[in-house]
Amino acid sequence: MRELFGTDGVRGVANRDLTPVLAYNLGKAGAYVLTKGSKGPVKPVIVIGKDTRISGDMLEAALIAGICSVGADVLRVGVMPTPAIAFLTRDLHATAGVVISASHNPVEDNGIKFFTSTGYKLPDEVELEIEQLIKEGVDHLPRPVGSEIGSVRDVPDAADRYVRFAKNTIDCRLDGLKIVIDCANGAAYSLSPRIFRELGAEVIPIYSEPNGININKECGSTHPEVAARKVAEFGADLGLAHDGDADRVIAVDEEGSIVDGDHIMIICSTHLKGKGKLPNNTVVVTVMSNMGLRLGLSSAEIEVLETQVGDRYVLEELLKSGAVFGGEQSGHIIFLEHNTTGDGIVTGLQLAAVIKETGKTVSELAARMERLPQVLVNVRVEEKTAAMANEEVKEAIRKGEKILGQKGRILVRSSGTEPKVRVMAEGPDEAQLVDLVENIAAVISRVSG
């Protein structure tokens, strides 16, 4: 069982849980595992990027030290979205990639996530191998000397490379569109507005002035109501709200209504199907997706494959099934034709392209799905596993399910990235859902002390 790695790399409070020592060990063990098959006169190379958190510099320095200590070189690209690191790892023909980010989490947190040479997140067994090396102690790993020690090089055109890639994922310009982009004071702060402007859109950037401590603070994809207000204020056609590392996006229609990942998926999948670009007419979603999405896709004669929560599991199912499109309600959308991970900028471009190609507004496009009421509460706990296994919690869930019957569902799961249990209920009566969720959440809080 993995202890360090969650569903999205290693995360924790920077300098308390995720310390420079742990970052060094991860760099050393990760580089050893990911480059041990590399042979020849040229050293293996690892791309490193980060978001705008104040702790990023500290962790980057420790991570680089660990990587160089086992004889791998580093290509440092600076502040860059997570999906850009996945792309650059491939584009720069690197042996591996790593990004320092805690995505949508608050500034106190940070994380370290690795990519293979092909830009995919690491399989469970590789993460387990890295963990085991760290448990055993990394001092026994190779210690090259002299010219065999790794070195660090900056990549001055890294941003330009990603900009070219992202722009080429759509076949039209965006002239005439007015777009509000909430950059969450994160990794997309310069790239996202630049890309949309270069494609002809009028861009109104907000929360695009990171200072190291304001990432995700009351903005971005976890607070899309901020972008919604700006869309209404400026009379924009579209709003896009990124998270801290820009691997997700939540949209806003021209009326200021929030368009989540489920709505984005039905808009883009039906458009892809109409263009003959949806293999097997299949979309991959998670258990958190709204029942309305399933109904909408069914009426469009699109098959749905379901996974547990986490974009890594969506990706696994895409690769297994041969599908090329899927995602999460939270805005992690994977266009496998373009990138190997969720990419909030590319997703925003695809959505904007649908608007241009169809001549329809976002609200008209989103109307293809009727969203059933869904209530979600996050309960902070010390021990997620214990809370989920508690008999009182299980009984509270059973009672709620009995009340809903066939008209809805209850989903209780532990977060893969935070010390929280998420309680979700879905059905036709929102007031009833609120009562059910609050009751289950109260039981979890009580038994968790």
Image (tube, rainbow, N blue to C red):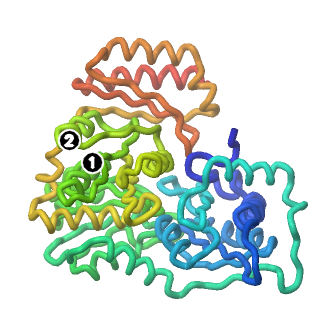
Determine the image quadrant of residue 343. Answer: bottom left
- Return the x and y of residue 237 as percentages of the image width and height: 16, 64
Residue at 23%, 69% (x, y): give it: 179
Q: Residues within 10 Å of mark 1 (few under 14, many from 20)?
A: many
Under tag 2, what secondary structure? loop
- Return the x and y of residue 360 as percentages of the image width and height: 10, 60
Determine the image quadrant of residue 29. Answer: bottom right
Q: Amino acid at mark 1?
A: Asn
Identify the disc placed on residue 95: none
- Return the x and y of residue 5 as percentages of the image width and height: 65, 48
- Name the quarter where the N terminus is drawn: top right
Q: Mark 2 and mark 1 in contact (Cβ < 8 Å)?
A: yes
Q: Amino acid at mark 2?
A: Glu
Q: Residues within 10 Å of mark 2 (few under 14, many from 20)?
A: few
Q: Which residue is mark 1?
A: 281
Distance from Cα at disc 1 to Cα at disc 2: 8 Å
189 in relation to 267, above or below: below
Q: Which residue is mark 2?
A: 301
